[in-house]
Every structure is written in structure tokens, then in C-alpha cells.
Image (spheres, helix red, strand yellow):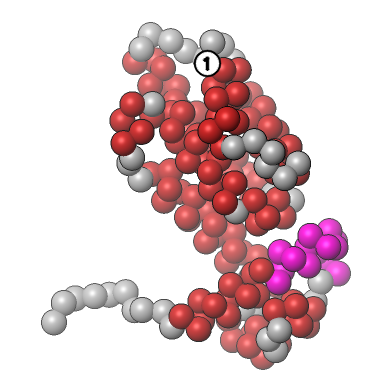
């Protein structure tokens, strides 16, 4: 018998949690004051009951924290997975992967970036990308003209605008613009 420490999660649990998360995002988009949201409002939007909510989450903050942890774990996993493109253009391909994740989860990111802790954690991931990029540039005898923290702040501002505007450009196009701006 194989030693499988991971227990398979019931698909109904996954679906139920997803419904609560989608309900929260939907309600935040409608009403930017998250402090006015109640568990009952989230349960009603998810078309589930409050008791079901409390089977999976302690409170609304627990729901938000689980969402943040999951999306950042997924983003970190994507950033660490090697691809064929990574072998050629390591820094830029990581930025594209980062932006593609934002593009695919634009609604979630647009809402979650209002959370100060979430913004800090995403900013740190962006700094890691730039550190990786900077290392590759140094190997080629090049360096950034600006400190990477300034580049990360500028890039973060561009990404925030991009999300607020409904992602009008593809992740690749945006990565190329960022690359052109800071890779001279």
C-alpha cells in the first residue's frame, strides 16, 4: 500500500468553499466597505446557509485569509515552476507568468489588492522576480539603472492600473512594456 499522506478533499467541500469565495468577491465589488458585510450576506449570495459557512470558516476574516493564502500559494508555485521559456528569458518569463496569473484571476486580485497585507505579500513576490531578473542581468554585465524597489513600486502601480481598467492589454504586451521601460 503506497504511503500517501495527502487525503483527497471531497469535491463538494472544494465547490462549497469556492462558492463562498466568489460570493465574497462579488459583494466586495458591489460594496467597497468590507466592514459592512455579514456572514448572512455572503451565505445568501452563495445560495448556501450560515451553518455551512461556519463549517468551513470561523468568520469573514478567516475566509479572506484562506483566499489570500491560497492565491499566493498558487502564484508562488507558478513562479517557481520551470518552463522552456524560463531557460531563455528567465526574468521576463517570470514576470509574464506573474501577469498571466493576475490576468486569469483579475476579479480576485482587483478586490484583494485593497488589503494592505495582501499588497505587501504580492509586492514581495514582485521584488523576488526583480531580484532574479537582476541576477541574470549581472551575469551579462548589465544592471538596473534604478533600485529594484523603485522598479517594483512602479511595476506594481502599472499592474494596479491594469487591473482597475479591466486588463486592456495582454500579459505579454504589458511585460514587454515593463521590460522596455526598465531594461535599457
Q: Is residue 139 above or below residue 148?
A: above
Say which residue appears at 45% left-offset and 36% top-offset.
Answer: 94
92 on left or right of 58:
left
Residue 2 percent coordinates (x, y):
16, 77
Residue 105 percent coordinates (x, y):
60, 53
Q: Quadrant of residue 30?
A: bottom right
Q: Secondary structure at mark 1?
A: loop
Residue 101 percent coordinates (x, y):
53, 48
Quadrant for the N terminus in the image = bottom left
112 on left or right of 30:
left
Q: Is residue 105 above or below residue 60?
A: above
Quickly name the residue at label 1: 183
154 on left or right of 56:
right
Q: Is residue 24 above or below residue 117?
A: below
Residue 24 percent coordinates (x, y):
71, 69
Say which residue appears at 79% left-offset and 78% top-offset.
Answer: 41
Using the rendered image of the protein, determine whether residue 151 is visible from the camera's viewpoint: yes
Say which residue appears at 35% left-offset and 45% top-offset.
Answer: 81
Q: Is residue 58 above or below residue 51?
A: above
Amino acid at each position: 500500500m503506497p504511503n500517501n499522506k495527502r487525503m483527497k478533499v471531497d469535491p463538494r467541500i472544494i465547490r462549497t468553499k469556492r462558492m463562498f469565495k466568489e460570493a465574497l468577491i462579488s459583494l466586495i465589488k458591489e460594496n467597497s466597505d468590507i466592514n459592512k458585510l455579514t456572514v448572512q450576506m455572503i451565505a445568501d449570495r452563495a445560495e448556501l446557509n450560515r451553518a455551512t459557512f461556519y463549517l468551513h470558516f470561523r468568520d469573514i476574516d478567516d475566509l479572506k485569509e484562506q483566499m489570500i493564502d491560497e492565491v499566493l500559494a498558487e502564484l508562488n508555485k507558478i513562479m517557481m515552476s520551470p518552463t522552456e521559456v524560463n531557460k531563455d528569458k528567465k526574468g521576463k518569463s517570470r514576470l509574464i507568468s506573474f501577469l498571466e496569473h493576475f490576468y486569469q484571476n483579475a476579479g480576485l486580485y482587483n478586490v484583494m489588492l485593497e488589503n494592505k497585507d495582501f499588497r505587501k505579500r504580492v509586492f514581495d513576490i514582485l521584488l523576488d522576480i526583480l531580484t532574479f531578473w537582476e541576477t541574470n542581468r549581472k551575469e551579462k554585465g548589465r544592471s538596473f539603472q534604478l533600485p529594484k524597489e523603485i522598479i517594483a513600486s512602479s511595476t506594481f502601480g502599472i499592474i494596479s492600473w491594469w487591473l482597475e481598467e479591466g486588463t486592456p492589454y495582454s500579459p505579454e504586451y504589458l511585460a514587454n512594456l515593463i521590460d522596455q521601460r526598465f531594461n535599457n
